[in-house]
Image (tube, rainbow, N blue to C red):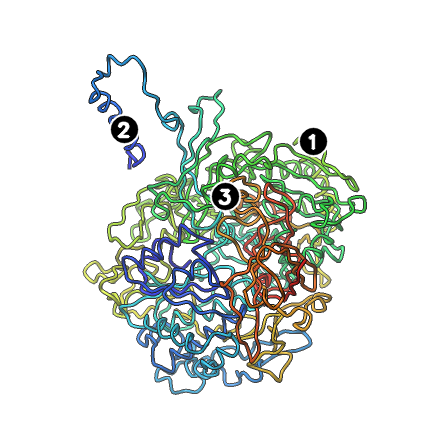
Amino acid sequence: MTNHWTDIKNADVILIMGGNAAEAHPCGFKWVTEAKAKNKARLVVVDPRFTRSAALADLYAPIRTGTDIAFLGGVINYLITNDKVHMDYIKSYTDISFLVKEEFAFADGFFTGYDADKRKYDKASWEYQMGEDGYVKTDPSLQDPHCVWNLMKAHFSRYTPDVVEQICGTPKAKFLQVAELLASSHTPDRVMTILYALGWTQHSVGSQIIRTAAMMQLLLGNIGRAGGGVNALRGHSNIQGLTDLGLLSNLLPGYMTLPGEKETDYEQYIAKRAPKPMRPGQMSYWQNYGKFHVSLMKAWYGAAATKENNWAFDYLPKLDKTYDVLQVFELMHQGKMNGYVAQGFNPLNSFPNKAKVGAALSKLKFLVIIDPLATETSEFWQNHGEFNDVDPAKIQTTVFRLPSTCFAEEDGAIINSGRWLQWHWKGAEPPGEAKGDPEIMAGIFLRLREMYKKDGGAFPDPILNLTWPYKVPHEPSAEELAKEYNGKTFADQLDSKDPTKVVKKAGELLDSFAQLKDDGSTASGCWIFTGAWTEKGNMMARRDNADPYQNGQTLGWAFAWPANRRILYNRAAADPSGKPWDPKRKQVWWDGAQGKWVGSDVPDFKVDSAPEDGMSPFIMNPEGVARFFARGMMNEGPFPEHYEPFETPIGINPMHPNNPKATSNPAARVFKGDMEAFGKAKEFPYAATTYRLTEHFHYWTKHVESNAIIQPEQFVEIGEALAAEKGIKAGDKVKVSSNRGYIKAVAVVTKRIQPLKVDGKIVHHVGIPLHWGFKGVAKNGFITNTLTPFVGDGNTQTPEFKSFLVNVEKA
Amino acid sequence: MQLSRRQFFKVAAGGLTGSSLVAMGFSPTAALAEVRTFKLARTTETRNTCPYCSVGCGIIMYSLGDGAKNAHAEIIHIEGDPDHPVNRGTLCPKGAGLLDFVHSKNRLKFPEVREPGSKEWKRIGWDEAFGRIAKLIKEDRDANFIAKNADGVTVNRWLSTGFLAASASSNESGYITHKVVRSLGMLAFDNQARV
């Protein structure tokens, strides 16, 4: 979230789209009802289903799954053509005046540079025009046809209300009602927030959906403001923390990135990630990348990371491509992987195309499961009848299953969607011989290191030199690890203004990432967490819930990264002269008398940079401003465009009906064999989507008795019209099949899913809750990801779980 | 924040019991039978965070046992933390069932192995488990580690074993997992954020 849960109460308009907070995040949704009750906020829900969030909405609009870019693109067009943009905001805080290379163009569904054979773009033309002074050329008069404003206007002009209705199936009048309400937040005294979840990410165009939403919020001037922002409601309790810590194929902690194999020169690796400002007077905070990187390498490799060996640059593996889970299971399916470890993760249930995932696991030599619960993945080799019809004798994988602790049995911090690091305490011992994850990692690692020490082996250096300063080596404590990611200094740090003063003594914990150095004198395992555990103690354990400005910022509760800041980009809550856009909302503002930025939040800005210095609020971007034009940072184009899901119920992209290559995301990666496994509407005519129920959490709570009692049996939801057409009654058992397999479940016939008229034909949706499997105390059921397609978003490779095709028949 | 809302209630509840006894004509010192106190009054309270969705609701866990080294703590009740600024004491149907998660009969208790082609699990000790896993990892890493790519460039990567990390585990677990996994040169590494 750019903002956080309690801050939702400050909104005037709330858009829930691509999520269902009332059911999936119920205790966070209370701040929506708070905004409605106390702030007269209006709630808008756009969803294929009339969810419980919709039931509390002031306005609900149905939409066909996977068409959110067309809908939001329609809103953007509405805002521009009806002059409902916050012009003062976007003129000062975005790239609208920037000039783009003249050769950049968009035609017939493709941006310039498309290579259809490689399914990839040459992005050379997706860049700015640079002036001789080394800065981007701009046209503040917005007359130049190549300025971002004019390119964007032209791009979205095609998304008329009629096109929205044709693609999304949303009745035009309903769409216009929604657009008008969202547009009402373009004035400085009104703010809108957006709450989304996996209903936006799990598409082959997921990243671009979220970009479209961010663009809409920028046009309305709603980023950086209390009650505003683009707010991802994340799916798990610490998925934010593990993302922040960089546990992804291509990342390092704190959103640093691993080098590619073409980046063999250390200086170039750093320089590329530490861009100089692209406009005069801008901060470009990533210029400090080297300090964060060197401090990480000192935390991991200590004395073995030296200036001479480029801080152990060779210890980092170099990427030839990203090994995301779809890529890894593709390789596993080809028999190219030997070992796999699943720590608190149930891939057999969680990844698309269960048949392919199960076959891939069967080709492993060894699989290690670390989990508090008996997962389906741990028993992928066991025959569970129709739910998992395999022959154990034919599966040669050795499987280890190691019991781990759950939340109640450990100390530590987890990070909620609002970026709050909240400490928790152990309340009891784990059952049996279960151990904590750090202990299990230490157990494996220390034995491995012993073997490398004794017998040698392939490149043992990083293993032998990994810092391991824990008092009980086989049991690193949460406190020791938290202090390590916070960071410390090895040398006395002197006051920059008065070098006779020591501000940090050697060995002390650091207060802020501003204290990190690139000379090897500091260590920090995750720079954005610096300040979480300082010499003053554990900041994550703070429990002062005081809210002096009554705007929900509670700066004394836990610790929010970065720097305990509660709302990102909050400099944009004030106008260019430093005064709040809305005097009623006290966020941060320039205090001329003190010569600094002050307020109810920690300013997200250079605290002593006066408004007349002209520094812009988006300090992480080298431009200093927010980007409508994404340059080469997205794989399918610098502006979002509607492409159909890979399994489309209408077979064409109505935006480009004559270019079949632009039907679905032209830059999405599709593996051989998976393209053939996509179903066609002729055989599988219904648009399907998967989701959570309020009574269950993913695949865990089927192991929990109380949840199993309130929602015991697998079901699917179909609309009354489809049920009548198929002769299905409520309570009948139905078989739902895709081109990859089938599930059987009880039919719930509902008014909550209505047929939509799309591109001249009727499209029915089938709703598939995802919580069942063949292990648990609930009634056993089918793994829903038996049905889903093995293709991901063009940038993140997040699978397209939310839009695919099925057929439904009576079982 | 020294006296929390809950501690205040505890004190207040004690006072109320005493004064109503007096009102009914008993003198506290002359009472012959003790009034039964709430079971929760004798438990240990521990603050924690709900491990399900990302709202991060504060919870209070009540356990038997007073923290003494030879007392075995057992959690007997979990409820929302009223001091928490987001959930203000409430829990959803998932959070309200947390006690049954802690005590689920499907909690794993011992390390186990399933050997190739076998139909069943076999219980093993941690020592055997760690030893065998470390050996398998080393064999694969030593056989398939790529020090240089086809162009002779140092790449120091290992692709034939992968790791999925848990997005419900703590920052500290995640941090040490990342540290160990990267030191091996592994790239097939993701967590639930990918899906």
- The chain under label 3 reads B
Whether the residues at callouts 1 and 3 have beta carbons within 8 Å, the answer is no
Are the residues under marks 2 and 1 on the same chain?
A: yes
- A124 relative to A231 in the view: left or right: right
- Quarter of the C terminus of chain A within the rendering: bottom right
Where is residue A569, by image quadrant?
A: bottom left
- B120 relative to A722 in the view: left or right: right
A357 or A690, nearer to the observer: A690
Residue denoted by label 3 = B170
Residue at 69% across, 31% down: B124
- A549 relative to A341 in the view: left or right: left
Q: Which amino acid does the dot numbered 2 rest on?
A: Val
Where is residue A334, by image quadrant?
A: bottom right
Q: Which amino acid does the dot numbered 1 rest on?
A: Ile
What is the spatial separation of the Cα atoms under label 3 and label 2, in whole angstroms? 34 Å
Are the residues under marks 3 and 2 on the same chain?
A: yes
Tell me which numbered mark, 3 or 2, is placed earlier along the sequence: 2
Q: Which amino acid does the dot numbered 3 rest on?
A: Ser
What is the spatial separation of the Cα atoms under label 1 and label 3, in whole angstroms? 27 Å
Q: Residue A676: horizontal and vertical position, in percent?
A: 72, 69
A719 or B8, nearer to the observer: A719
- The residue furthest left is A593
Residue denoted by label 2 = B11
Residue denoted by label 1 = B124
